[in-house]
Amino acid sequence: MVARVVTVAFQGVEARRVDVEVQLTGGESAIVVVGLGDKAVAESRERVRGAFTGLGLSVPAKRIVVNLAPADLPKEGSHYDLPIALAIMGAMGVVPPDALEGWAAVGELSLDGTIAPVAGVLPAAVAAGAMDMGLICPEPSGPEAAWAGGTRVLAPRSLIGLINHLRGSQLLSEPKPGPMVDGGRVPDLREVKGQEQAKRALEIAAAGGHNLLFSGPPGSGKSMLAQRLPGILPPLSAAELLETSMIHSVAGLIARGELTRARPFRAPHHSASMAALTGGGLKAKPGEVSLAHNGVLFLDELPEFSPQALDSLRAPLETGEVMVARANAHIRYPARVQLAAAQNPCRCGHGGAGKGWCGKAPRCQRDYQGRVSGPLLDRIDLQIDVPPVSAADLSLPPPSEGTAEVAARVAAARALQVERAERLDGAVLNARAEGDFLERIAGLDAAARDLLTRAAEAGGLTARGWTRALRLARTIADLDGADRVKRIHVAEALIYRRVAAAAEMAG
């Protein structure tokens, strides 16, 4: 007799079906696991044996063959413990075989029979629902699985409780979804004195989802400004919340099923490797750019990151996804982020024309900023010089406008983009508009198109730069409530992209 239990294998945020087949055969007493499992899967036989002993069950003195099908799909992780244990008990007759039908299972077993939480329960629940099955998962993971609406969920605390439920002697109640929590206090823009142009750039970036870079000496407020970006962004939509939460679930970052509509804000240290930023490692876990999906990736001290790590972000910033290549698999992670970065003008922090503090300028500045490649900078829509805050600015009272007022304007601009996307069937955010859709929504008047053309002819714009300047101008027009992109909107967009020749033309 062969007993079967369904579980899943994770490939990125996708959970693929795996059938756990168990057969009791004659021969030397042993548990043999086949099907391309990793070290954690191979060790599951000892955890299962220990859990059985903890419950007072004895493993049959037979050769127990556990097959994880399909055999050519790599299996990683300890979540195979529970389905293996259930399949063995089904083959032993401890639980009725028909009681396991219609259920998928994930969970790690402790030696006393307790079912320990595992990562990836939310994608597993979504996959189980797609297969028209329920999900059996650990009790601590039940509130997380319950967020997959329409999927039946069982969340036992221990193996004995699950056995009693399957045999009909005990009834387990279905868990409720975890709480929707606030994202925590977000710093207010009212705390930033001066830097009006930088605040304007921050508002434009938030309205259209554009990448931005602040450049200025230490203490000028670059990090303060970037940290206030999440506060002016609208909350995650229902679809975005599910996408983001599935990535965090695979990474093991969801505790007791708590979700939040606040957009992710990830700020890795500049010592982060390429694998830490884009994903990879032994089990190809999601990197910082994927953990910031639908949110903000903040790179402080941008030139201090390794050039290899920075250049690995070029493709994700363009395509909105990361492909982690392995010899036996290609794993995809969503990575649609808004990049915010900050840098000093040079290593000492005070270089640049007019500063006069750096004895090695301009070479120091040129060498330091040269660590960031041109193609990466070309993907950054707004590049802002942040001057030092003057004593006069510091002595002024707090600004009258704060995060709430700016967030209201950003929400209004994004509402225009949503309405336009629904009407014309295109990208929601201006930062992702392209092709004919971008041309249609821009609606450049003659003066605006002439200015953009002259800037490109002057050598200040690449083909990508043209598209990004057009997107940026559309966002500026949305903040103004204008139907068409005018010359003044294009001129401001070109200034933010540091197209000096075009800026002179605009003057």
Image (spheres, rainbow, N blue to C red):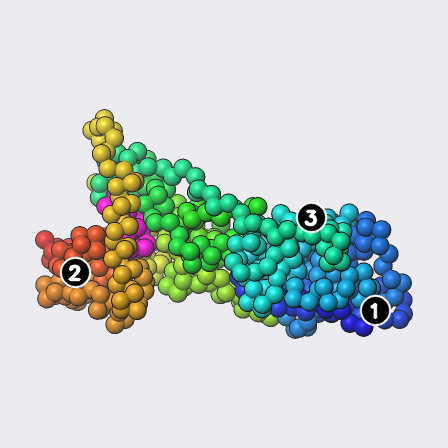
Q: Tag 1, which secondary structure?
A: strand
Q: Is residue 57 magenta?
A: no
As helix, strand or loop, the secondary structure at mark 3 comes to loop
- Numbered range of the magenta stretch: 198-215
Rendered location of residue 462, percent (x, y): 26, 65
Give the Cα distance between marks 2 and 1.
Answer: 72 Å
- Image position, residue 254 (x, y; %): 54, 48
Q: Earlier in the sequence, mark 2 or mark 1?
A: 1
Image marks 3 and 1: residues in contact by CB distance under 8 Å? no
Quarter-wise, where is residue 358 in the image?
top left
The amino acid type, in three-letter code, at marker 2 is: Asp
Query: Is label 3 or label 2 in front?
Result: 3
Foreground of the two, 47 or 356 = 47
Asked if the residue under mark 1 is in contact with the one under mark 2, i.e. CB atoms within 8 Å, the reply is: no
Closer to us: 310 or 166: 166
Residue underneath mark 1: 24
Image coordinates for residue 423, horizontal then vertical, percent? 26, 67
- Of labels 3 and 1, the one closer to you: 3
Residue 157 tag number: 3
Q: CA distance from mark 3 to mark 2?
A: 58 Å
* Residue labelled with disc 2: 483
Q: Which residue: 70% across, 61% down?
A: 83
